[in-house]
Image (cartoon, helix red, strand yellow):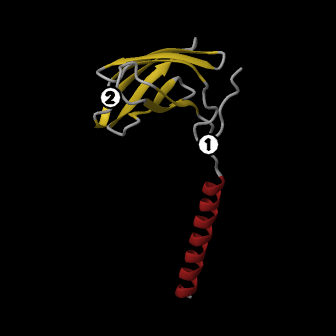
Amino acid sequence: MKSTMIVSLLAASVLTAGAFAARQAVAQPAPVAGISGFAPSSIAGCPNIVWRVARHADGKINGIFWFSDLSGASEAVGAEDAAGHFHIQLTSAIGKGPVGVVDGTRSSGKVVADLKGEGCANNHVMRMVPVIDINKEGTLASPG
């Protein structure tokens, strides 16, 4: 009798775990808007600066910036206000990643921003097209 009870409990545990795993596999991540792109440094002889950042519903921004020659990558942390103005701080995380601040505005689906920082970490970006869902490739917003 004891062994039948143990087998029943094990079978119930396996079925419960399987049902939980199936629910987890079906769940899709919520769309997270963001910006993905690159721009040349405004300093002659420097590599392009590439980025991928996510903009969350609470206005927080996080992501990465890196030099196209892979000499370094940086953590990007910031926020955007209700009017579309944003401020992002870049801190080197690997190698000699871009260090500085990005200040800009997102309006009517377009982004204009300036990166001001150390050495090659300087550029001006105009008319970047945002990403509708940073979780998927090829989900750019229409240029408007």
When asked about the image quadrant of residue 58, the answer is: top right
Left or right, 72 with respect to 36, comes to left
Query: Residue type at mark 2?
Result: Thr
Residue 57 image label: none
Q: Quadrant of the C terminus?
A: top right
Q: x%, y% of residue 45? A: 34, 25
Secondary structure at badge 2 equals strand
Query: Residue type at mark 1?
Result: Lys
Of pointers 1 and 2, the one earlier in the residue sequence = 2
When asked about the image quadrant of residue 135, the answer is: top right
Q: x%, y% of residue 89? A: 37, 22
Q: Residue at x 59, y 61 (%)?
A: 21
Q: Residue at x 32, y 32 (%)?
A: 97
What is the crowding at mark 1: few (fewer than 14 residues within 10 Å), some, or many (at least 20)? few
Residue 91 image label: 2
Position above or below: 74 against 116: below
Q: x%, y% of residue 23? A: 64, 56
User: Going by the picture, which residue comes out furthest to the front?
Assistant: 45
Q: CA distance from mark 1 to mark 2?
A: 26 Å
Question: Which of 47/142 is in front?
Answer: 47
Q: Quadrant of the N terminus?
A: bottom right
Residue 23 seen in the current view: yes
Position above or below: 129 against 7: above
Left or right, 102 with respect to 137, comes to left
Q: Residue at x 64, y 63 (%)?
A: 19
Q: Which residue is mark 1?
A: 136
Q: x%, y% of residue 98? A: 34, 28
Question: Which of 51/87 is in front?
Answer: 51
Secondary structure at badge 1 equals loop
Residue 85 seen in the current view: no
What is the crowding at mark 2: few (fewer than 14 residues within 10 Å), some, or many (at least 20)? some
